[in-house]
Amino acid sequence: MTRALAPGGQLTELDLAVLQHAAHGLTIAATARAIGKSAVAVQDARHRLMGKLGATTLVHAVFLACQAGILDGRPRRHGDHAGYEAHRRRGEDPTQCEPCRLGERAHRQAMRNRNNENQEAA
Ligand SMILES: [Zn+2]
C-alpha cells in the first residue's frame, strides 16, 4: 500500500487502511477484525488521520481524502473487460463481481471469434 502526503503529516499504512475501511462503512469493531488490530488501535488511528487531514469528523476526513486523491471516490466502471481489469488493479477478485465476470466472458468470446475469423481469412 502506498503512503500519501497530507497537510498534517504523512498517513501511515494503518491510517490508510482504517480510512479505507471507514469509507466502505465498516465500524471500528469490524475494521479491527478486518485488519487484525485492536478496537483501541483503530479508534486511535481514526483520530490521528483526522488530525493529519485537518478534518473535524470522520465523514469530513473521507471527503477530504477523496478530494486529495488519497481515496478514489469516482464512480467505477463495471460490466465489461475494462471494469474486470480495474478490479484486478485494485487488488479485488473480479470474479466476485457478476456484471464484470459476464462482461469479461463476452470479451473473451469476442476475441475468440475475431481470432477464428482471422484464421479463416488467412
Ligand atoms: Zn465490477
Image: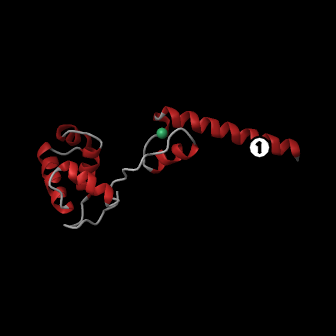
User: What is the quadrant of residue 69 in the picture?
Assistant: bottom left
Residue neighbourhood size for the residue with mark 1, other residues' Cα within 10 Å, grouped as few (<14), some (14–19), many (≥20): few
Residue at image location 31% in from the left, 62% down from the top: 3
Q: Specify the farthest residue to the right.
A: 122
According to the image, label 1 marks what residue?
Answer: 115
Determine whether the residue tagged by mark 1 lies in a helix, strand or loop. Answer: helix
Residue type at numbered disc 1: Asn
Is 119 on the left-hand or right-hand side of 86? right
Residue 93 position (above or below residue 49)? above
Is 96 on the left-hand or right-hand side of 50? right
Residue 83 position (above or below residue 63)? above
The image quadrant where one finds the N terminus is bottom left
Residue at image location 54% in from the left, 35% down from the top: 101
Where residue 91 appears, as percent x and y from the top left, is 42, 47
Report the number of numbered marks: 1
Where residue 59 appears, as percent x and y from the top left, is 21, 48
Residue at image location 24% in from the left, 65% down from the top: 10
